[in-house]
Amino acid sequence: MRIVLLGPPGAGKGTQAVRLAERYEVPHVSTGDILRFVVAWQTDIGMRAKSFMDEGELVPDDLVLELLRIRLAQEDALQKGFVLDGFPRTLPQAEALDKILAEIGQAIDVALDLRVPPELIVLRLSARASCPTCGRTYNLLASPPREEMKCDRDGAPLLVRDDDRPEVIQQRLGVFERQTRPLVRYYEDRGLLRAVDGAGSQDEVLERMMNEIESVQGTVA
Ligand code: AP5
Ligand code: MG
C-alpha cells in the first residue's frame, strides 16, 4: 500500500501513521521526523532547514525532495510501499512524488485527509510529547506514558517539540491553510481522496482510516 496522510498540524498524522505502518507492515515515512533528525545531526540540509522549522514555515521543496527521494529509494519502501506523513505539503511536492513513483511504475493508492477542528488542534499540540527514538507520540493529558516523560515502548526520554510554542502553532496552521490545503483538491481530482473525521479516540480514528483503506484495497490488489 502507498498511503498519503493529509491534515493540519496536530491532526494525528504521526500518531496514526505509526499504527497504520504496523498494521499494514509498511515503513512510516515522516518528512518532519527526517528533518528533525538531520537538524539534530547538523547535516548540510539540516542546517539549512532549521530556521524554517523554528519559524513554523515550510522547508524549501528542493531540500525536502532530496531527503524524500533517498528514503523512497530504500528497499523496504520500494518493496512494500509506505505511509507518508507530512509529505506532500505543496503542489510541486505532490507532482514530484507522482513523478518519482511513475518512474518506477508505482502510484499512490489513497490519500487520507484527517479533519480536526482548530480548537482541538491547539489543545492536542499544547499537550504533545514524542519519542525521538521510535516516533510514538503521547498526549500528556489524554494518553500519558506509564512512566513520567518516558516512552512506553523503548524507555527513551520524551521530547516536547520546539515548534509547539503557541505562536509557532498559529503560524503552522496559517501555512497549512495557504500551502497545503490545495492538495485536497489535487487528490480529489485524481479520485484518491478519502476524508476521515480525526476527532474521537485514537482507536476510533484508526478504525475509520482502516475502513477507508480497506474500501480501496480491493481496487488496488
Ligand atoms: P511535521 O513534523 O510534519 O509537523 P506538522 O505537520 O505540523 O504536524 P504535527 O506533527 O504537528 O501533527 P500530527 O498530525 O503528526 O499530530 P500528532 O500525531 O503528533 O512538520 C514539522 C515542520 O517540518 C514543518 O513545520 C516544516 O517546517 C517541516 N516540514 C515537514 N515536512 C515538510 C514538507 N513536506 N515540506 C516542507 N517542510 C516540511 O498528534 C498531535 C498530538 O495529539 C499528540 O500529542 C497526540 O498524542 C495527540 N493525539 C493524536 N490523536 C489523538 C486523538 N485521537 N485523541 C487525543 N489526542 C490525540
Ligand atoms: Mg507529526
Image (spheres, rainbow, N blue to C red):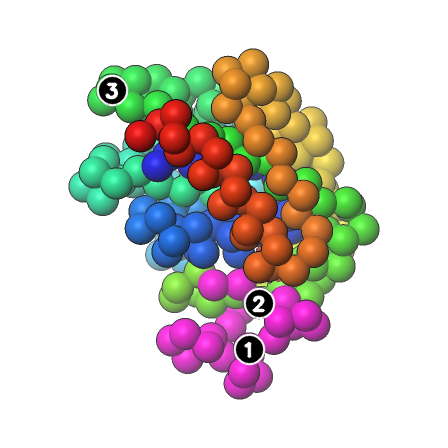
Q: Amino acid at mark 3?
A: Gly
Between the C-alphas of marks 1 and 3, the distance is 42 Å
The span from disc 2 to disc 3 (Cα, nearest Å) is 37 Å
Mark on residue 176? none
- Give the CA distance from mark 1 to mark 2: 7 Å
Q: Is residue 30 left or right of residue 170?
A: left
Q: Earlier in the sequence, mark 2 or mark 3?
A: 3
Residue 31 seen by the camera: no
Question: Which residue does the numbered mark 3 point to in the structure image?
Answer: 105
Q: Specify which label sits upstream in the sequence, 1 or 2.
A: 2
Q: Earlier in the sequence, mark 1 or mark 3?
A: 3
Amino acid found under the numbered disc labelled 1: Pro
Question: Can residue 19 be seen at all in this image of the molecule?
Answer: yes
Label 2 CB-ligand 1 distance < 8 A: yes
**Considering the numbered disc 1 on the image, is that residue within a helix, a strand or a loop?**
loop
Q: Which numbered disc, 2 or 3, marks the residue closer to the eye? A: 3
Amino acid found under the numbered disc labelled 2: Tyr
**Which of the two residues, 138 or 167, is positioned nearer the viewer here?**
138
Q: Quadrant of residue 103?
A: top left
Residue 200 inside the magenta-drawn segment? no
Q: Which residue is mark 2?
A: 138
Q: Main secondary structure of the magenta part?
A: loop
* Residue position marked by numbered label 1 in the rendering: 145
- Numbered range of the magenta stretch: 136-159
Q: Are marks 2 and 3 in contact (CB under 8 Å)?
A: no
Splitting the image into 4 quarters, where does residue 188 fall?
A: top right
- Asked if the magenta segment contains residue 155, the reply would be yes
